Amino acid sequence: MTRLTPLVAWQSQQGARGKENDDHYGWFAVERRDQQTTVYVALVADGVTSTEGGAQASRIAVDAVGAALAERPDTRETLSEWLANAILHANEEILFEGKRNPQWKGMSTTIVLAALAGEKLYVMNLGDSRAYLLRAGRLYQLTADHTWAQAAYEAGTITAVEAQHHPGRNQLQRYLGGQHTVNVARGLIAPGADHMEEYLLVQPGDRLLLCTDGIYRRLAPDLIRQTLVDRPGDPQGVVDTLVTTARANGEIDDITALAVEIPITATAPLPQQEIEGSDPVLNRFTPLLLGIALILAIITIYLLLNSA
């Protein structure tokens, strides 16, 4: 697959409740010279509104991850470790700023991160902001929510339908800013399966969506899928439609969506002579030249033997 710069767009809208927008997002490219690649990183963070400083926590999370990845990397780290450590750095920054600003004490945020390194897609998250993948017309959820309802569903005590209406569906079990030790979910749910993978190999035409709960709480999965399907090559149209529709459907919380698309390209293979670096004219006469050289060699040996 030809490596091209992904198409990307984002949209964030303050919720109808009228409070400050607690969502933040980020998109940046990081040069990894030690691995001779550019890593494209997308982030969405949703400040926890039950605490003071939710907007500050999500902003710090995005800024701190970007700052950590911009520093010279430890070449002993894997890409997965490098990304996870950037999130851990963001957690420490949130705790630090909470101590410096008493009005922000206890501030916290969710985070979902997607990183594209060559053909490998890495996804990490804390909380209930999600990552989705559209591939060949099918929508796959790549992350699992860190909520009490999701935990109960995974334990088999409630059904998937019950989890959607469970009182604990918004009660987070993991997030940034709660304590110094956080368990970053590294990896993604393999499309069409129920097991986790460290990364996913992307394909031309893949579309990735990162969003806060303001999107998926108001939009059914099939509507999200159809919006992505209907707008190939138009990530801005995708996020604008999703955010506008969620707001029209009565969402009062902040609404944020970030879409990334892997472009589709058709590259013809190079002619054989260009791959080998040879001259097509020379290739045409190579058998004749070899035959002449062989005859000359035989004549030379014959003359040497007779002269002796």
Image (tube, rainbow, N blue to C red):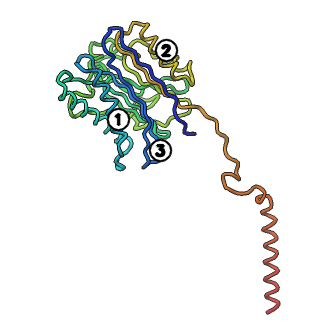
Give, as a three-letter code, the residue at label 1.
Arg
Q: Position of residue 62 (x, y in %)?
A: 34, 29
User: Which of the marked residues, 2 or 1, is nearer the chain's N terminus?
Assistant: 1
Give, as a three-letter code, the residue at label 2.
Thr
Task: Name the front one of labels 1 and 3.
Answer: 3
| Residue at the image position 64 percent from the left and 36 percent from the top | 266
Measure the C-alpha gap from mark 2 to mark 3. Answer: 33 Å
Mark sitting on residue 42: none
User: Which of the marked residues, 1 or 3, is nearer the chain's N terminus?
Assistant: 3
Q: Quadrant of residue 114?
A: top left
Asked if residue 216 can be seen in this view, the reply is no
Q: Position of residue 162 (x, y in %)?
A: 33, 13
Q: Mark 3 = which residue? A: 37
Task: Name the front one of labels 2 and 1.
Answer: 2
Asked if residue 94 can be seen in this view, the reply is yes
| Residue at the image position 48 percent from the left and 23 percent from the top | 139
Which quadrant holds the C terminus?
A: bottom right
Q: Is residue 54 left or right of residue 130?
A: left
Q: Is residue 170 left or right of residue 132?
A: left
Which quadrant holds the N terminus?
A: top right
Q: Is residue 275 above or below residue 141?
A: below
| Residue at the image position 25 percent from the left and 24 percent from the top | 108
Q: Mark 2 = which residue? A: 241
Q: Position of residue 281 (x, y in %)?
A: 78, 57
Q: Mark 1 = which residue? A: 186
Q: Nearer the viewer, residue 148 or 170?
A: 170
Measure the C-alpha gap from mark 1 to mark 3. Answer: 21 Å
